[in-house]
Amino acid sequence: MTCALRFLVILLLLTLVSCHFKYRRPNWDREFRLKESCRDRNNVEERLAVSQCWFFEGMKSWFRRFSISWFPGKTKSWNLTEITKHCDDYYVCMENTKCYKDYVLFETFDRCSHDAFSIGPMSFCNKILKDFNKNSPGILPSCVVDYLEKDAPKKWTCENTKSLGDCLLPQVQKHCDPGLLPIFHEHQAARQYYLGCDGTLKFEDLEVFNSTDSTN
């Protein structure tokens, strides 16, 4: 690859990142996401830490996601920790700001890890299920068809994560690579943990958070 071509590729990637952050920027400073001590706009140091974490670690996370989506085959040999490493790094960065509420940290991690799992190893199973549904329409359960054809929920909850996992499991067992099953089970159990569904984690202000749009 020539220097000029490398420059163009880098310029294109930076443009994509810029557009991503311009048009999909999360409202990291919304009150329901931050602890009370960080909501004061005069608290410059902590708010700067939040914005820097969102931009720099968020950009690294986006590049990692971009890599997985372009080369999902490499994730077939990865464990769940490797698949979600960028999510863990972003979680640590958010936690170190000492500004985000606990539930926001874990909800963000869950959303990131589910996305990584979906565009990584699960993407091959999704393709198999889509092809099967195309060739044999009307056989897959409606919940599976909805999962394949519709956008993901804007907000993940204990109920819809468990419902999705229970819906997909029989079809994963029947149609997909048997090697996917262990990590599928691990991912589903992790989701129940991160969202506080299994009772292990107890979150403060959870009711306030659940009553607020957390999709941004």
Image (cartoon, rainbow, N blue to C red):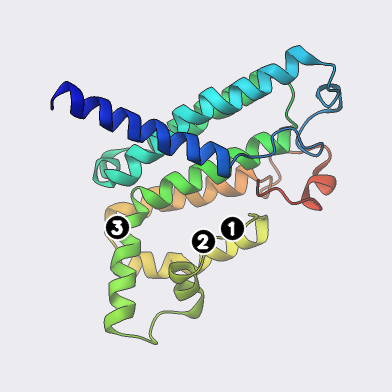
Residue 139 drawn above or below residue 153: below
Q: Position of residue 62 (x, y in %)?
A: 45, 35
Q: Residues within 10 Å of mark 2 (few under 14, many from 20)?
A: some
Q: Quadrant of residue 177?
A: bottom left
State the separation of the CA atoms marked 3 and 1: 20 Å
Q: Are marks 2 and 3 in contact (CB under 8 Å)?
A: no
Q: The residue under label 2 is which amino acid type?
A: Gly
Which label is found at residue 165? 2
N-term-proximal mark, 2 vs 3: 3
Residue farthest along the left direction in this orientation: 1
Q: Is residue 180 left or right of residue 206?
A: left
Q: Position of residue 150 (x, y in %)?
A: 50, 69
* Pick the front one: 59 or 158: 59
Task: Give the structural element (helix, strand or loop) at label 2.
Answer: helix
Residue farthest along the bottom direction in this orientation: 138
N-term-proximal mark, 3 vs 1: 3
Q: Are marks 1 and 2 in contact (CB under 8 Å)?
A: yes
* Location of mark 1 (residue): 161
* Location of mark 3 (residue): 124
Q: The residue under label 3 is which amino acid type?
A: Phe
Q: The residue under label 1 is which amino acid type?
A: Thr
Q: Residues within 10 Å of mark 3 (few under 14, many from 20)?
A: some
Residue ID at (71%, 45%): 199
Image label count:
3
Q: In which quadrant is the C terminus drawn?
A: top right
Q: Nearer the viewer, mark 2 or mark 3?
A: 3
